[in-house]
Image (spheres, coloured by chain):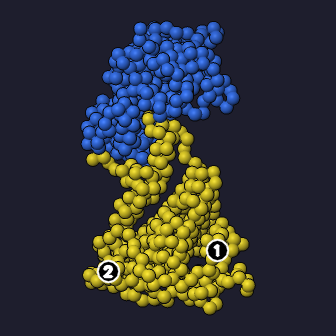
Amino acid sequence: MTQPLLQIEDLHVAINGTEILHGINLTVNAGEVHAIMGTNGSGKSTLTKVIAGHPDYMVTQGDIKLRGVSILEREPEERAREGVFLAFQYPVEVPGVSNMYFLRTALNAHRKHRGQPELSGAEFLAVVKEKAKLVDIDAGLLNRSINEGFSGGEKKRNEILQLCVLEPAMAILDETDSGLDIDALKTVATGVNALRGPDRAFLLVTHYQRLLNYVQPDHVHVLLEGRIAKSGDAKLALELEEKGYAWLEAAV
Amino acid sequence: MASTTTQHPFAALTPIPPALPTIRDEDWRFTPLKAVTAQPWSVPSTAPVKHDTPDLGGARVVFVNGRADEAQSRLSGLPAGVTISRELAPLQQASPERPFVALNAACARAGAVIRVARNVKIEHPVLVVYSSSDGAAFTRLRLELEQGAELSVAEHFCGTGRHFLGSITEAVIGANASLKIARVVADSAQAVHVGEFNARLGRDARLVLDSIALEAEFARTELRVELDGEGSHCDLRGLALARGTALFDHQIHVDHAKPHATSRQLFRNVLDDRSRGVFSGRVIVRPGALGTDAQQQNNNLLLSDDARVDTKPMLEIYADDVKCSHGATSGQLDANAVFFLRSRGLDEATARHLLTFAFANEIIEHIAVPGVQQWLSAQMGERFHGLGGTARSNEQ
């Protein structure tokens, strides 16, 4: 029996002494796409950040395992090299650091971890050009500082470009679809669908059902007030779109 | 104040040295002179001192321990209309009331004057090297640009061991003339500098100045710019990368004396260990200087809890219809940016180096004097563990 890729067990998380997640259980197998839906403040973003290892969040109980091994004590960069990737809801601007230099440094850190030789500038350029086409990102943005002066859509495309270059096993997208026009949304979906495969899993955090029209999830979970209130298949997303969250809130 | 029982630190150089300022003087409030006054300074030795300044392809004026070094200089081969002479020109713009100006007036032994005739343009920057090894030295440089002339200059302050250098550079920039100058303090970790650059700009004249402090124990740089011509413009930028117990101080005075002049100031400090940074930016808009446009920005990055910065913007506006702004920020690296880079697989040290480098490099990459950016990128690379200029390169 193969290990689940990601296991979250009875996870309690606090920030500044306030508990936000009250016992999350979630199992994600390689090859699966899970969607996490929920209202604002339900703890969706907290869940993604705690998996990626954000230092502000404290796990007070429970565990997060990657391929059966706890990652709670791992640094964010170690989790990244082991295959965890978080596409941020609000991508940060990093003035003075070029996208290309950053991406190459990141990819080479991953390759080194896997025992592969580092890519030269020319080799990297070939990789990134191909991926840039996939996410329809303007080549001019690649030589600019990370996200500096990018539009909202360009920032999100840039997150997906990083995803495509780093090819993580466990990709987590935190509301990547919010604020996107339909073309940008389709591009994000194209990137995700291109990467879908038997060795990779996705956790899509979203507010809306819209993205799920383009990326068909295997499982849908509803997060309410720090707990998973309901899990189901793709049909649950449609039901939420129709009925809202109120009927579930009553059940919490 | 030097008392009669304690020897004045510059007593060996001049019989009646002026009293040195203390932190009770407003202009020195954040700049204790410990590094200057700790031990008396001797007359420097005459031993030759090598320098490692890269060739910028043009003329070279070298001072060693405050004396002209003709063997290392290259003053010939200048285009017609350009002269470099080894004169100790009298100070014309620096105020003799300031103690270090008075010391320079009394103690300077060597100087140089660069003159560029009307509408003449020099292709390669003139490199001026101040290399020192011991004692206290004072130098003067004078730059005279006639109408429409163009000149670029790189000043490099360097050397070995503990020494003091009091330098004054004066520039007269004629109507429609343009001066680009880069001042680089990349000296020994015990070096002590008090430097002044002053400039008077004529109508539509332009000044672009970069003041970069990378290594010294103490470096105080006063930049005094008089926008004395209508439509004149100055762009002043500075970067101080301090570590250990270093103190780097930039004192800026921009005087808008005539209408429609513009000034830009951008100064950054990166302070590690127990180092200190000082920024004082004063902008004066004289009565009648209509249409003045003055902007000032000071950003400070504190890498250690023991580092300290003092920043003091001052706007004195005596005219109507002017546009003046200033802003100052001080803080640590953006925690969200550090987490973002780590979440992509960069280890924490690399993420921090990269962000620090990026902050500093925004000044370096805009240095206007040809060749200086490449030279300092290499120095930055050593400082930031091999990042060098590549963090910005296009990877092509």
Q: Chain of mark 2?
A: B
Report how far apart the C-alphas of labels 2 and 1 lie in the structure: 37 Å
Could you confirm whether marks 2 and 1 are on the same chain?
yes
Residue B146, compared with residue A128, is above or below; it is below
SS class, disc 1: loop
Callout in the foreground (2, 1)? 1
SS class, disc 2: loop
According to the colouring, which chain is yellow? B
At 38% from the left and 69% from the top, the residue drawn is B52
- Please name the amino acid that badge 2 sits on: Arg
At 71% from the left and 82% from the top, the residue drawn is B6
Question: Looking at the image, which is closer to me, B12 or A252?
Answer: B12
Q: Chain of mark 1?
A: B
At 64% from the left and 74% from the top, the residue drawn is B38
Colour of chain A as rendered? blue
- Please name the amino acid that badge 1 sits on: Ala
The numbered mark, 2 or 1, whose residue comes first in the sequence reads: 1
Q: Left or right: where does residue B80 sit relative to residue A21?
A: left
At 34% from the left and 83% from the top, the residue drawn is B71
Provide residue A105's location: percent of width, then percent of height. 38, 41
Q: Residue furthest bottom?
A: B15
- Asked whether the viewer can see residue B75, the reply is yes
Q: In this figure, which residue is indicated by the disc labeled 1?
A: B38
Judge the density around disc 1: few (<14), some (14-19), many (≥20) Cα neighbours within 10 Å.
few
Q: Say the numbered circle drawn on residue B74.
A: 2
The quarter in which the N terminus of chain A is drawn is: top left
Provide residue A78's location: percent of width, then percent of height. 47, 32
